[in-house]
Image (cartoon, rainbow, N blue to C red):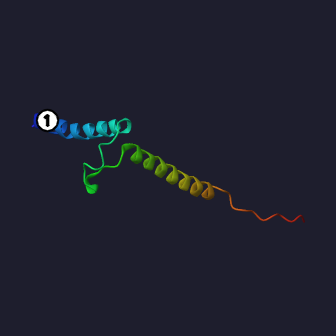
Amino acid sequence: MAGAGIIGHHQVAVRPRQKLLLGFKQITQKHSSADDVPRTDRDLKMSTVLIGLVVSVLAIGGFFYILISQATRPPPTKPRRSP
């Protein structure tokens, strides 16, 4: 039973690793000619995906930074009058 689980896990873990390595290869290599493949079968370049990911993370981080900095700001106090 454990052997089947180990073999199954190995088979499932290999495919994502291969796809990830293929994606990083695409950063440095040119794409195949766009004329060879129908428009609906073309993949995004890995560099485009990574740039989009970085921009998204920065935008979300900036949003939460602004949100938290406004939430932690102390409320304005009224000036005290001297007696």
Residue at image position (27%, 40%) is: 19
Say which of 46 and 55 sits in front.
46
**Residue 35: percent from left, percent from top:** 28, 50
Residue at image position (47%, 52%) is: 56
The residue labelled by disc 1 is 7
Number of marks present in the image shown: 1
Image height check: is 80 above or below 13? below
Q: Quadrant of the N terminus?
A: top left
Residue at image position (34%, 49%) is: 44
Quadrant assignment, res 78: bottom right
Image height check: is 60 above or below 9? below
What amino acid type should be assigned to the residue bearing mark 1?
Answer: Ile
Residue at image position (22%, 40%) is: 15
Q: Is residue 67 left or right of residue 37?
A: right
**Residue 4: percent from left, percent from top:** 10, 37
* Residue extending farthest front: 35
Quadrant assignment, res 83: bottom right
Say which of 28 and 3 sits in front.
28
**Residue 62: percent from left, percent from top:** 55, 52
Say which of 71 and 53 sits in front.
53
| Pointer 1 local density, CA inside 10 Å: few below 14, some 14–19, many at least 20 | few
